[in-house]
Image (tube, helix red, strand yellow):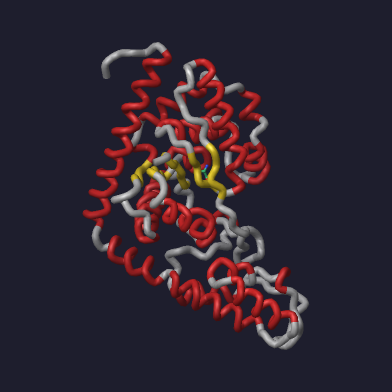
Amino acid sequence: METVLSGIQPTGKLHLGNYIGAVKNWVKIQEEYRCFYMIADLHSLTTHSGKAEEINDNVMDIYMDLLACGIDVKKSVLFIQSAVPAHTQLHLILSMITPLGWLERNPTFKEKKTELTNTDLNNYGFLGYPVLQAADILLYKASKVPVGMDQIPHLEITREITRKFNSIFKDYFPEPTPLLTEVPKIAGIDGRKMSKSYDNAIYLSDTPEVLEKKLKKFITDPAKVYKDDPGDPEKCTVYPFYKIFINEAKKKETAKGCKDGTRPCVQCKKEIADTINHELIGYRDKKEKYKKNMDFINKTIIDNNKKANEVAIKHIKEIYRLTGMDYEW
Ligand code: TRP
């Protein structure tokens, strides 16, 4: 079985974009791969340094969300990055062979610098973000990394670092490839990409009522003013949900109704809210149970951190030995 590793930053609560773009796929591939999933709390320090309480709350909430969505710890290891110290050890080793140019050219680095003007990003750790990500992946010798399009540049840097390491230290790591999740980008309430930083997201933890209320605010074709005006589904932010949550046939029927003016926007919004709420029934049930059973959650976290550490320690000792540091610790 091939090994998979993926991670999510605890910079906010899980939203529908994370669920569609990552978590659903993580759940699905558990059958085919040996999966390691982690909450990347060290990575979140690049933008959230000093916000200890917020990070810790998010880690716990996301951990329960992932379990409630169907990450099964009998099949996969679900752990917290900072509880496996070898991530930082490998990060340092890899940082010694990573040319600065690779990091300075990283498009996410440039993008975030222009976007997050209120955050001080003028630090060494932020530039090294992709090196830490490479350490995450390589520490488990993962060969597949399920990610969205936005992470491709980071994965490309991981691949470059892998080749460089392998050329020096005789092909130790497999060269990881992306498992791309092909999902349409979904918009948030304001029409921009759904994101915690835009404050426009539907959160998994939203109640059915809040979810319905938020969906009502989604932007549809502005030319469809009255309910029997014809509309253009391609200009509607609710329309993509038909393909994601229902099916192609229903999507076609909806498009036709929209174009010929027989389908009011409120009907689509209600239908989609009901469908998503229905899909989330199992999640909401489990999340409630987990929240009332923190002993179980804490024990699960400890068990899983241990499992990750077993693999990580074995590999980092081999890597240290390769690099010339073969001492007992
Ligand atoms: N950078 C990823 C994101 O922001 C999170 C992440 C950290 C990750 N380490 C990883 C993803 C390793 C894949 C593999 O979404």
Q: Residue at left 69%, top 77%?
A: 255
Q: Residue at left 51%, top 23%?
A: 95
Viewer-proximal residue among 116 and 283: 283
Numbered label tally: 0
Q: Position of residue 284 (x, y in %)?
A: 37, 68
Residue 195 in the image: above or below residue 289: above
Q: Position of residue 124 (x, y in %)?
A: 55, 28
Q: Position of residue 120 (x, y in %)?
A: 58, 38
Horizontally, residue 167 falls left or right of residue 139, namely: right
Q: Quadrant of the C terminus?
A: top left
Residue 19 in the image: above or below residue 80: below
Q: Residue at left 59%, top 68%?
A: 243
Residue 75 in the image: above or below residue 191: above
Residue 270 position by quadrant:
bottom right
Q: Position of residue 114 (x, y in %)?
A: 68, 42
Residue 237 in the image: above or below residue 135: below
Viewer-proximal residue among 262 and 288: 262
Viewer-proximal residue among 213 and 257: 257
Q: Residue at left 43%, top 32%?
A: 141
Horizontally, residue 269 falls left or right of residue 203, namely: right
Horizontally, residue 71 falls left or right of residue 117, namely: left
Residue 138 position by quadrant:
top left
Q: Quadrant of the N terminus?
A: top left
Q: Residue furthest top?
A: 324
